[in-house]
Image: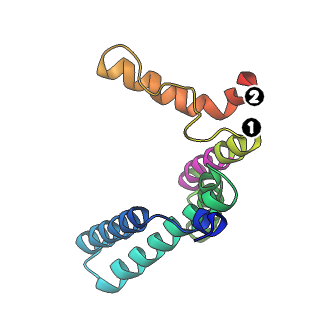
Amino acid sequence: MSTALHRFVPDKLDVIGNVVTALLVGATIYVLDGSLGNAAGSAVLFLALEISTDIADAVVGDYAGNAVFGLLVLTAAGAFVSLTGAWWLGGCFALCGCWLLLDGVQHLRYGVSRDEVGVPYRHEGSALTGLSRALLTRLLEPFLLSSRR
């Protein structure tokens, strides 16, 4: 197999992991909703989302999946607000989508891959302070990438 083709074809373990995750999502929807059709549809959509973000990561670069997922969350937030009118909840979804989009674009812009991320996501301290510092560091990372390069 040529190296160009191998780059775009996901590993067998990645595919198995995506299928297992999609099955878990489907099982969760089935337990919560009780409808097999909704569970199967959700599992298929989640598997398609996982595969599309894996392909985006392989074709465009690392963190491209975050940008794709951010665009999808922004689109879903807009549809949610237009259908329900709950602007505050849609605004929270839109904020998450904007952060994911910004994170993906900034990492692609500065060429930082997941292997090169120089930010430690664990800090000294108790579980409460260490976790909050790691979370804050990760949330601020898209804004701090320009100062590191």
Q: How much space separates mark 1 and mark 2, taking CA atoms? A: 7 Å
Residue 118, quarter of the rendered image? top right
Q: Is residue 4 above or below residue 125?
A: below
Magenta range is: 89-101
The residue where tag 1 is placed is 110
Q: Residue at x 55, y 59 (%)?
A: 86
Q: Secondary structure at mark 1?
A: helix
Q: Which mark is residue 146?
A: 2
Regarding residue 83, the answer to whether it shows in the image is yes
Q: Residue 69, located in which quarter of the rendered image? A: bottom right
- Pick the residue in front: 79 or 5: 5
| Cβ atoms under marks 1 and 2 closer than 8 Å | yes
Q: Give the percent coordinates (x, y) of residue 14.
A: 42, 62
Q: Is residue 80 visible?
A: no
Q: Nearer the viewer, residue 74 or 12?
A: 12
Image check: 64 left or right of 15?
right
Residue shown at the point (39%, 74%) measured from the top left: 43
- The amino acid type of the residue labelled 1 equals Tyr
In the rendered image, the residue lying farthest to the front is 1
Vertical order, 66 against 129 (above or below): below
Image quarter where the C terminus lies is top right
Q: Is residue 70 magenta?
A: no
Is 88 placed above or below 121 here? below
User: What residue is drawn where x is 62% and y is 41%?
Assistant: 113
